[in-house]
Each structure stands twice: as structure tokens, then as C-alpha cells.
Image (tube, rainbow, N blue to C red):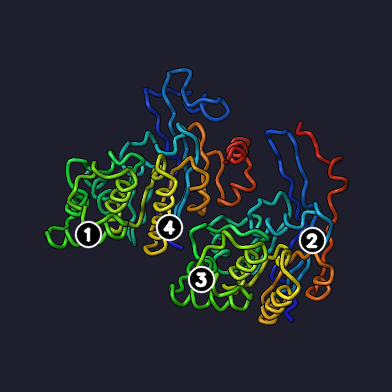
Amino acid sequence: MDKVLEVENLSKVYGPGCASCFELTGPDFDTNICPNCGSVVAAHNVSFELFKGEILGIMGESGSGKSTAVKCLNFDQAPSSGRAIFYDDDKQHDLFNLNSAQQRRLANHRFGMVYQNPNLGLNFDISAGGNIAERLLMSGVKNYTGIRCRAKDLLSRTEVLTERMDELPKNFSGGMQQRVQIAKALATNPPLLFLDEVTTGLDLSVQAAILDLIMEIQQDMNTAMIVVTHDLGVIRLLAGRTLVMKYGRVIESGLTDQILEDPQHAYTQRLVASAL
Amino acid sequence: MNDTPILRVEAYSKQFELHEQGKIIPSSCDVNLSVYSGRLTALIGPTGAGKSTVLKGIYRTYLPSTGRLIYQTASGHEIDLAQADEHQILELRRTEIAYVTQFLHALPRQATEDVVAQPLLLKGMDKAKARDIARNMLAAMNLPERLWNISPATFSGGEKQRVNLARGLVSRPRLLLLDEPTASLDPKTTDKVVRLIENLKDEGVAMLAIFHHPELVKRMADDVVELEPPIAIENIIEEIA
């Protein structure tokens, strides 16, 4: 199997940071705020590998650092330290040592990101089709009819009525906005997709449809994905392997069925026991 | 018969450490057994002897506490399932090892034939062909055709169990783990399922199975391994110091 991504010791600290930040925070101290300098340790020494076509779940409560990890990988934030290698066919990219133009290029061409809040992933001032066109333009497609065709394809793929492709996304329901966001993320056929709490806050029926869509995409396109969620049901459904995070640390990782049926860490046991 | 086992379980034990309750619960204790291609090894013993825990340890739904689970892969390598990395396990689950439980976990919106075809799709087979094979398997299981394109969510226990079995058998695994596969079937269907399992055995599939009917053990098993519950479970539950 082919590796898509290798992350080593990714850390992110908000604030000045000091020598004891990592020593005095984490699950053992029940906090991610350094008592010495007040910095927030959002993520510390997060390491994992991701293979082609694989879905990795990152699970944890709010503030556990799960989104931070993904945002660093998508270049939305700069990590404090750590390394990440993206394997793209026969090329290797050392993500955090690229210049910003190279990073933008990768994010536009080779990564797809779907945020919990469609506001972050979509431009609400241009039409649904325009949002997709924007991404295609950024990745170098120039021909107008080509772009329009592709946008139409993607929207029907994600079950957005193509009759509405010229409407502004703000007129859409939350579920529909999420579908447009997914269509936009898929526009360049990225081998790597980040999904950050994509079904949180949606109606159950809409959640189910979005999750089905994600599974279909994985099966048809063999896209590797990182799914960040606090929802055990989403993890069970989508992820083959799962990392559990707390106070910025990965406290446990394993096969998803093993994490859910034989959790090792006290926190994971509590989390699984509190499932509905 | 090939006398190199496809799987050797050596001194396997599993206990659960429950942090919240501060307890260690022993389940399987010092289990030793071998499973051979084309043969069925039956696990017997009273409830609480840790039979299912052995199967789940081999499938790695449970993390083994101690012991070795030496599996001979199709490519001739030996691999300790207790230690193997997660990607190796996922790959073996996709291509070589199947696990059929008494319970069916399926999406309430997925058609039965698609539930059964799933393992074939994961192996890269195209949808139409996978569905064809799935339908044949459902027919062989005696499941009425009118049920094939609806979700198994509303099925009876026996119907669900056959869907589950069909899904486990459809991908022709090398090693099949069966946890009471006929528990809720009527005698006629049981007979049909037993014959299907026997056919697979003749084709060389290695099986490790838990049956609760002694007559099934007598009919199906080539080897029998009896497990004892960890001596008086209540007494051995230890407080974690």
C-alpha cells in the first residue's frame, strides 16, 4: 500500500511558549494551558501515517486539538514544530518547509478541505458554481465552458440541484451548503481530503446523506481522508483507524472497532461509555 | 490435509482493565489451539469461558494481553496478529480473514444485497459482478428474493444472521471466524447453512468456530478445543492497586 501522508511530532502552541509548556500540560495535568506562561498547547507530538484510500478518524472533545492538527496540515495555521511529508505519486513534499506559494499550490491542487462552518470553505458573495470555478481557476483551468461543465458535474455528483448553481450559497440550507463545500473540495480530484466536523449541527437525515456521499467518494475515487469529529457514530461509520486526542495529545490510537470495543485509556473508556 | 496450521494460538490471554471501576476482568486465559486449512476447529466451553474473546483477539477487535497469534499469510509469511501493525490487520481483513458474529451491524438504508456485496467491492470487484455473487449467496442461504433489495434492519433474527453469514462467506476468506453462526436458525435452514460451511471447508477454508449445539460440534468439527472460565470469575476480579 502507498503512503500518502506521514506526520511526525506536530505541535502547535498559541502564546509566547516557555520551556515548561509541554511538561506541565496534557491529560495528566488536566489542562492544555501552561501554568507558567499561559500559552495554550493546542497540539503536542501528534504523529501518524495515512495510506492511499484510507480514512483516519481523529476523535476528541472540543479543545482537544483535533482540528488544529488538520488546520496545520492544510496550511491554515503554521505549526510550532514538527514535520509532515506528503507523498504525491513519486514526489515528496516536506509540507512545513515549503514557501507560501508552494503551500498554496498544494492546498489548491492536491488537498481538499471541508470545514464545519461553510463560511470558511465557501465564498458567500459568489454563486455555488462560482465557488467551484474559483478553485478550478486557482488550479490553472482556464477554459470557461470546461469549468462550467466540471462545476455542473460536481454539483450533481454531490446532489445539489444544478438549476441552482448560479445562486448564492447563502440562500442554501446548511446541508446544501455542506454539499457545495464538498463539491468545491473535490473539484481538483485531490488525493487527500480533510473533513473537519462536517456533519456537526446538521439534521440527522442530512447527516446520513452527507456521510453516504463521503463513503461513496472514498470508494469511487480512493481518496485518503482525515475525518475530525467528536461523534462516535461518524467514526464508527467512516474510519478504519482512529486517533483519540485529549488536551492536545494523542492518548490512544488503533483500529476503530478496537478503540470502540476495547478502549485502553481511561478517557476513551469514559467517552465510549457515554455514547448514546 | 496440510499439516502446517494456518493459525497457531499460543498462550493467548485477555483481560480487560476497567479504569473507571478500578477493576481487571479476566476473559480468556492461556488459550492454545491450531487451525488448519480445510478443517474446522470448534471452541467449546460454558458461557464466560472467553470463547468469543479468542475470536475477537484474532480479528484484533480486542487487543490481546499476552500470547502469540501466529498466522500464515497467503504469501507464506508468518505474522503475529497480536503485534501486527494496524495496516497489516486491515489488509488481512480485506483479503484473507473474515469474522461472522451473531449480530448484524448494517446501515438502515443499505439494501441487503449491497450489505453482502460490500467485502467484494472492497476487494476491487465491479458493482454489477459483486451484486450478482451476493445474490447467489443469498439464494444459497434460503433468503427470500423479495428481501434482497431492502435493508436488513427489519429482518427477523434468523434472516439477519443469514445476511451476516452471506457477507462473511461471499469473499472466500482463507480463515473464517464463526461466532455461533446458526444460533437463531430453524433446523431446516441450519442444515442448509451447515452444508454451505462444509462446502467451503472442502474448498480449503480454515475455520475456527463457536457452536452452542453439541450435535453441530459433532457433525462439523475436525478438532475440538475446550475452554474453562477463569476460575470463579468473581474471586479473581482484582482491584487495581
Marks 1 and 4: same chain? yes
Whole-percent x, y for residue B227 in the image = 83, 58
**Residue sitting at x 73%, y 70%:** B186
* Distance of label 1 from label 2 (alpha carbons): 60 Å
From what the image shows, is residue A52 above or below residue B95?
Answer: above
Circle 3: residue type: Leu
Residue count near mark 2 (Cα–Cα under 10 Å), binned few <14, some 14–19, many ≥20: some
- Name the residue furthest front: B146
Residue count near mark 4 (Cα–Cα under 10 Å), binned few <14, some 14–19, many ≥20: some
Q: Which mark is residue A215?
A: 4
Looking at the image, which is closer to me, B173 or B89? Answer: B173
Nearer to us of marks 3 and 2 is 3
Nearer to us of marks 1 and 3 is 1
Q: Which mark is residue B32?
A: 2
Secondary structure under the numbered disc 3 in the rendered image: helix
From what the image shows, is residue B13 above or below residue B112?
Answer: above
Q: Which mark is residue B120?
A: 3
Whole-percent x, y for residue B123 in the image = 49, 70
Sequence-wise, which precedes: disc 1 or disc 4?
1
Q: Is residue A142 visible?
A: yes
Whole-percent x, y for residue B8 in the image = 73, 65
Looking at the image, which is closer to me, A264 or B155? Answer: B155
